[in-house]
Amino acid sequence: MTSEAPWPVLESDLEFFQREFDSFVPARIFDAHNHLYRTADFTAAVPSLAASGPPVVDWPLYLAKMREIMPGRRFAALSFPYPAAGLDTAGANEFLAGQCRRHPATLGQMVVTPGMDPEFIRETVRRHRFVGLKCYHLFSPRTPTWDSAVEEYMPEQLVRVAHEEGLSITLHMVRSRALSDPVNQESIRRLAERYPNARWILAHAARGFNVHHTIGGIASLRGLPNVWFDTSAVTEAGAFEAIVREFGISRILFGADFPVTHLRGRCVAIGDSFLWLTPENLRLDAAYGNIRPVLVLLESLRAHKQAAWNLKLSDGEIEKMFWDNAADLYGYQERTGAIE
Ligand SMILES: [Zn+2]
């Protein structure tokens, strides 16, 4: 083992990266989906992944943990709190703001809940120079929250603020069929068209953990100029391919989803749902042939590499996915241009 808890990385993970990805992953990485947080801001239960890590997950920790796996790479990122039920959003946003102030290589997105006053959001974003908003279904009033329509956790009056202030919105869609769900399709198209200056980042390849939901639904967004997709924690290639086929190479943004990066296993489509295969729900004994799961980040990189192969992407196009697309979205060069 090369590093101890939290979130250990094995010698075999490093060997896997060297063999499979060292010649694939570009020198510069703009990570469009990153979580920075303190466990003290979870006033209800601490999510299990956060509970398995340190109390403070800050930018230096992120850099150290990412560089351990991907040596020699330089990073910038879009970071936001770790959304969870019972989150002290004020505390979480303050912590994030402090990180962004001290470390110009990360931009920040404010975590928002559907009941927030739009003018409070506007004032907070301006004061902290946040570039966007992070909504999440766990703040929806509906039970169960994963059946929520977009407007139940990202109400229209919040989208209007994003439009007026030129903000991005990272949206982790829910409802079982994600982008193949007509309710989600209608919401995103309507809000994107009515508020053209708000820029949607559909997280997890439009929540393509079941890649067929993104493949089946991508055409519903055809022609929208203000929709992007992050690749975070998606470990199969089909959704990435569907996005690039529909929108070209400029709308897909590499995202790692630290610290989800440091879980082990992968997510697979099964029927109309998806299943995370992890050491906890796999039989790793010899009966099934010596299965040794690697880090989710490595599985995700494998999906990127497979998509790049299938789409015949050039080195320049791969660099767009890993850096230029996000940098262009935020005018990053003019804003800070910082890289660490
Ligand atoms: Zn995430």
Image (cartoon, helix red, strand yellow):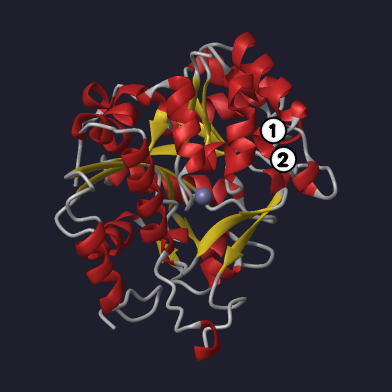
Query: Label for residue 177?
Result: 2
Query: Label for residue 34?
Result: none
| Tags 1 and 2 touching, CB below 8 Å | yes
Q: Residue at x 31, y 62 (%)?
A: 61
The correct choice, above or below, for 293 with respect to 30 in the image is below
Question: Which image quarter: residue 252?
Answer: top left
Asked if residue 246 can be seen in this view, the reply is yes
Which x, y percent locates residue 296? 44, 61
Image-based side of 130 in relation to 138, left or right: left
Asked if residue 172 can be seen in this view, the reply is no
Image-based side of 314 in relation to 80, left or right: left
| Residue bearing mark 1 | 180
Count the labels in the image. Answer: 2
Image-based side of 234 in relation to 98, left or right: right
Q: Residue at x 47, y 17 (%)?
A: 166
Which x, y percent locates residue 9? 33, 74
Q: Residue at x 30, y 64 (%)?
A: 65
Question: Which image quarter: residue 70?
Answer: bottom left
The correct choice, above or below, for 176 with respect to 12 in the image is above
What amino acid is found at the position of numbered circle 2 in the picture? Answer: Arg
Which x, y percent locates residue 203? 53, 39
What amino acid is found at the position of numbered circle 1 in the picture? Answer: Ser
Q: Residue at x 29, y 83 (%)?
A: 1
Which x, y percent locates residue 78? 39, 40
